Amino acid sequence: MEYFKDDLKWERKAKQPLRILVVGAGIGGLAVAIGLKQSGHDVIILEQVPHIAEVGAGIQMAPNAARILGRFGLLEKVMEKANVLEKNSLRRYANNEELGTAPLMPEIGQKYHAPLSVIHRGDLQAILLKAARAENIEMHLGSRVVEADPSFEARVRLQSGEWLEGDVIIAADGIKSDLRRQIAKAHGIEDRSQPTGDAAYRILIPKEKLEHDPEALKLLNTNAGMRWMGPEGHIMAYPIKNNKVYNMVLLHPQKEGAPNEESWTNRGDKKEMLDFYSSWNDLVKNLLTYVPEGDVMEWTLNTHRPLPAWIENKVALIGDACHPMLPYVAQGAANAIEDAGTLTMCFSITSDVSLALEVYQHVRKTRGEAIQQSAATTRKALHLPDGPEQQKRDEAIRNSNKGGHNPDLWADTEWQQFMWGTDVMKDTLENWEAYKGKVEGHHLTPLNATIYT
């Protein structure tokens, strides 16, 4: 496949097949189930909803995730549904001035040996779900896991009262994870989300709404991201579903009295949306008029304190259950897939559950939390009020194409190198003995993560 070049040599076979219970059938849960099943493990997925429906909107599939999906044999199917963005355009909110551009494909694919694309979350989940079923992974829908064994042995209790047992529990049960709260409590912490003060409108504009508007249609048919920055908010927009839908995420202050519940399915108010963006440029305001009434979804953005640990005994957290990410650097799904790739590699190298989980945490926790924190840093840069700080930011963006630092970390080449260039599976394999020594208490050699340059 174009841009996907993989030189990883690994024996993709479990040393000893394990019975692994995966809690949750979202992006991370399905990805880790597929990777482990392909390695020869017996995998069972426990998902609380009775039916998996298409939810969400556009998400980015960055190279650090694409190369893992390539190894799982899924990248070709993903690229059939994805849009490949050629650049990201960074713009002022009021006059639509382009401050700078971040080149994306094909340069990013050539540099990191894996493509960058955008895809509807529902399309990605459907591809993973179909692959999981093709692998004959046992899946129990309508099976909510409410707790793990008190000593975090590999046992979980369903809401029905039934206990299920395996060799490992992988909790991919999302931002409202019951198992996250249980692990936090074991460390004497009450796990609570904190509102950032931001919320996001997620809107999808179908092509038929734009067909008589040449300017809007040009946006839909151009594979470019648009990032408008303004006081207290910003907008990220790009085409998805092979240029049949225009995806927009609009960040704005959370309104007073709004619930802090984190959900993709809360309804927003179109009039309130239009009021907030009434001082923004004509192109933005025009696009928002095409949003169908009743189709505005509003999502409260909360932060979570990093946990002391992502693992306890035979239970591991992945994805939003351990590193819920704000959307400012577009790495939520990608980092969940990194978790899946790392665990797949660990359980291909060893059948020692404690060692595998310790190495997984060592490889992923510091990195995942650094990316998590970078999203909060980027939020501040994108939402500056007009004034000296904003002018300084804009000048830095203008100069970034000449090699300077970009305050929008998603577009900063040095931070891209860290996010997209690190190969967690290769890193785990090549540094296994050093990581093993580290988690067992004796450091053998310097650890150098594999990064594509």
Image (cartoon, rainbow, N blue to C red):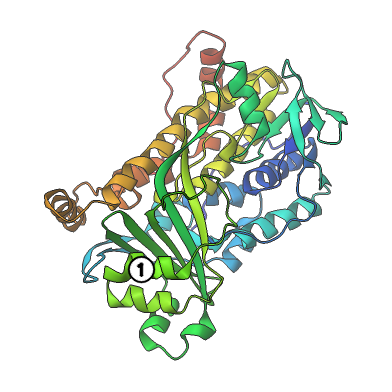
Q: Quarter of the image for the N terminus: give it.
A: bottom right
Residue 14 in which image quadrant: top right
Nearer-the-camera pick, 357 or 280 = 280
Q: Secondary structure at mark 1?
A: helix
User: With respect to residue 378, does 42 lie above or below?
Assistant: above
Residue at 55% x, 36% y is: 425
Q: Quarter of the image for the C terminus: give it.
A: top left
Q: Position of residue 307 (x, y in %)?
A: 52, 25
User: With respect to residue 140, does 354 lie above or below?
Assistant: above
Q: Amino acid at mark 1?
A: Asp
Q: Seen from this angle, which residue lies furthest front?
A: 257
Q: Is residue 275 left or right of residue 264?
A: left
Nearer-the-camera pick, 350 or 152 = 152
Residue 105 can be seen in this image? no
Residue 173 can be seen in this image? yes
Q: Which residue is mark 1?
A: 275
Residue at 34% x, 73% y is: 284
Residue at 21% x, 69% y is: 97
Q: Position of residue 85 (x, y in %)?
A: 42, 66
Q: Position of residue 374 (x, y in %)?
A: 36, 40
Q: Position of residue 17 (x, y in %)?
A: 80, 30
Residue at 38% x, 88% y is: 214
Q: Seen from this angle, which residue lies furthest left?
A: 388
**Number of marks present in the image shown:** 1
Q: Is residue 340 left or right of residue 236?
A: right
Q: Mark 1: few, some, or many residues within 10 Å (few <14, many ≥20)?
A: few
Q: Seen from this angle, which residue lies furthest bottom?
A: 212
